[in-house]
Amino acid sequence: MRSGSRNAEVFGGSAHSNIAIEFGFRGVGTTNSNSCASGTVSVGEALRYIRDDFADVIVAGGAEAPLTAITIGAFDIIKTMSRWTGDPALACRPFDLLRDGFVMGEGGASLVVEELEHARARGARIYAEVLGYAQLAPEQIDYVNAHASSTQLNDSTETASIKQVLGEQAQRIAVSGTKGYYAHPLGATGTIEAALCALALDRQWIPPTINYGNPDPACDLDIVPNSGRAAELNYVMSNSFGFGGINACIVLGKIRD
């Protein structure tokens, strides 16, 4: 990398390679490109590697910097982006009747995914447990961080999907969309929202759906409008739904002593 090799800097898997070289990481390493589900997939893959005894600690991250003319133009062609002309801070409005498309953002987040006893042995600050195929009943889920991209189709379809999966419990469970805070950073979304879910468990607090003012009958869940609230949280779920039908969901649990 540092010798001037451009190939090593720009090939498809260069993200994890550059990070590994910078920090001296060893062992398994991959870069995935799974649309808006990429970050969530990276957390799931980290869990799988640890369960299969390939590693004790993995850094699972997602990042994207799509604010370029070609990227914005491509999404504008398929008419998925917001055309809001009011206050820009109000353009991303998940579950609101007046939502008119997603607002593109940039960002990144990484989580340290670690075998539980290994983390405890080194005195790590543990925020949550990644449960993977959790085998939980719907009534055990306390909160869902929805993908909620602020498009008409996604938010109504996701509402219907939550109802289908969680049944009658869907009306009880808090479901918020947090992209009003940071827009839609595409491949970074999954790890940002997994981190939010871990913090929600740690702090026993549900983040709100901001910019909400006009109820949509097609999105008739408890969306925690505009103000977060304290709650007893044991299990939370994060949804990441990507273009091309690449979807991933992850369940996190409150850490037990």
Image (cartoon, grey):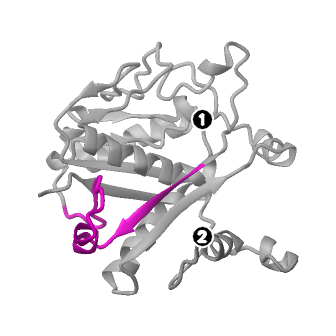
Q: Are marks 1 and 2 in contact (CB under 8 Å)?
A: no
Given residues 127 and 84, the one toward you in this image is 127
Going 63% across and 69% down the picture, which residue do you hit? 19
Quadrant assignment for the C terminus: bottom left
What kind of residue is marked 2?
Asn
Residue 19 left/right relative to 220? right
State which quadrant residue 153 falls in: top right
**Residue 28 in view, yes or no:** yes
Query: Please, what secondary structure does the residue beneath circle 1 have?
Result: loop
Given residues 219 and 250, the one toward you in this image is 250
Extent of the magenta region: 108-135
Residue 143 percent coordinates (x, y): 27, 40
**Mark 2 burial class by Cα count in 10 Å: few <14, some 14-19, many 20+:** some
Residue 246 left/right relative to 103? left
Residue 37 percent coordinates (x, y): 53, 57
Going 82% across and 45% down the picture, which residue do you hit? 68
Q: Earlier in the sequence, mark 1 or mark 2?
A: 2
**Residue 150 in view, yes or no:** no
Q: CA distance from mark 1 to mark 2?
A: 22 Å
State which quadrant residue 2 falls in: bottom right
Membership of 132 in magenta stretch? yes
Residue 217 percent coordinates (x, y): 40, 22
Q: Would you name the residue on which mark 2 appears?
A: 32
**Residue found farthest to the front:** 122
Q: Would you name the residue on which mark 1 appears?
A: 183
Quadrant assignment for the N terminus: bottom right
Given residues 245 and 86, the one toward you in this image is 86
Membership of 127 in magenta stretch? yes
Residue 161 percent coordinates (x, y): 38, 46
What kind of residue is marked 1?
Ala
Please determine whether, in this image, residue 212 is positioned above or below residue 189.
above
